[in-house]
Image: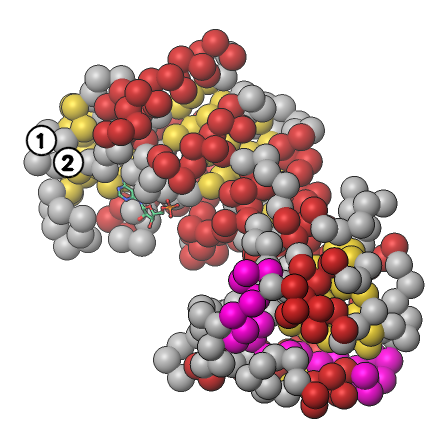
Amino acid sequence: MKKTVRDIDVKGKKVIVRCDFNVPQDKEGNITDDIRITSALPTISYLIEQGAKVILMSHLGRPDGEANMKYTLKPVADRLSELLGKSVLFISAPEVVSEEVSKAAAGLAEGEVMLLENVRFRKEETKNGENFSRELADLAELFVNDAFGTAHRAHSSTAGVADYLPAVSGFLIEKEVKFLGSAVEAPERPFVAIMGGAKVKDKILVIENLLAKVDTLIIGGGMAFTFLKAKGYEIGKSLLDAERIDYATELMKKAEEKGVKILLPIDVVAAKEFSNDVETAEFEADAIPAEWMGLDVGPKSAQLFSEELKNAKTVIWNGPVGAFEMSNFAQGTIAVAKALAETDAVTIIGGGDSAAAVEQFGYADKMTHISTGGGASLEFLEGKELPGIAVLQDK
Ligand code: AMP
């Protein structure tokens, strides 16, 4: 167990907090979704209430080590001021830590908040450069990491700074570790994982880790066709990772040995092109004609998956079971989201596209936990220790 802000005395201390304020913006720079900012509020508000002097930092986009003002955190400072109901000091220093910034940090009063400029304006950030880590650390007396979305990266602001300051987690990281960790380590059974998305390659390590833990593994999305091909089925023009057919065969064999049930699609919704504007047809999963590609699981598969989910007590979902961005191929993913919304199981959504899907289809508030980190939650589910969490003090 890692220490959290609750385990240390922060009153009167300068506390530097790594948040994940990597928000989506429109062309004018307006924030189009502020969930990443609101997710950080519990930690920030707690620190304010406790009388800490709060210094926030984050990255935004990929400025690639240049002070490109397209990626300034100014809009985040403005939104944060609105949400907190108090002014957040923001100095747009191209070098992130400047003399003016250091002075401002040193002069903060208890309960005051400042936000640094985009840490990726500095080349050293993503290289975990010692100098930059030390510059950040010199601003404060304590480090709090609350950026789960970047916890799988060993950067100056996520890990390096902890070389120089006592480091603990914020409430967001605490919550992510609690839900993802307990789901994987001590799940109430039956434990079902649903894996989807385009590529087998991206999910191999997660599947391997989860195979040792789950009772049932449901595989949908583009990646399912490599498994169907491995069973000798005709998959037409569907997505195929030809190099991983043997792997799929092996994995299914391993699952059988372990007594893990694997559910693959039994029917599909297909089209002749990857488009929402063409004719669609349903086929059995073992008989997709040569010129067709499966772009969603069919109604019988949706039924099969939903039945399995009904009996589950813990469910982890990572990756859509169809090309859900196109309405003609969204029904399978909607059915999975609905089944999860209707069970009383612990339901964990592993960030990225499945998180977007439950939001889009209006089931977000029915899930036990929606991870804020796509890549980070995947690595967590792979069983890896995330660098931004590893550096935090143990209880
Ligand atoms: P990933 O980033 O690997 O989780 O993949 C997510 C993407 O997989 C989404 O954009 C879906 O459109 C896509 N996807 C899901 N099912 C299929 C499919 N059957 N064929 C092609 N792409 C798919």
Which one is nearer the viewer's eye here, 1 or 313? 1
The label shown at residue 187 is none
Mark 2–mark 1 Cα distance, whole angstroms, equals 6 Å
Q: Is mark 2 within 8 Å of ligand 1?
A: no
Residue 120 against residue 326 in the figure, above or below:
below
Q: Is residue 321 above or below residue 369?
A: above
- Which residue is found at the position 76% from the left and 73% from the top? 138
Quarter of the picture holding the N terminus: top right
Which residue is at the front of the view, 287 or 385? Answer: 385
Is residue 270 in view? yes
Say if 162 sits above or below 131 in the image: above
Q: Is residue 209 above or below residue 43?
A: above
- Residue extending farthest to the left is 291
Image coordinates of residue 176 in percent, x first then y, are 65, 48
Q: Are marks 2 and 1 in contact (CB under 8 Å)?
A: yes
- In this view, the residue farthest toward the top is 257
At numbered mark 2, what does the secondary structure look like: helix, strand or loop? loop
- Residue 29 visible? The answer is no
- Residue 132 percent across, percent down from the top left: 64, 70
- Say which label, 2 or 1, has the lower sequence index: 2
Type of residue at label 1? Ala
Q: Residues within 10 Å of mark 1 (few under 14, many from 20)?
A: few
Is disc 2 surrounded by few (<14), some (14 to 19) or many (20+) residues within 10 Å? some
Say left or right for 100 vs 246. Answer: right
The residue stretch that appears in magenta: 106-128
Residue matched to label 2: 237
Residue at the spot x=70%, y=90% of the render? 100
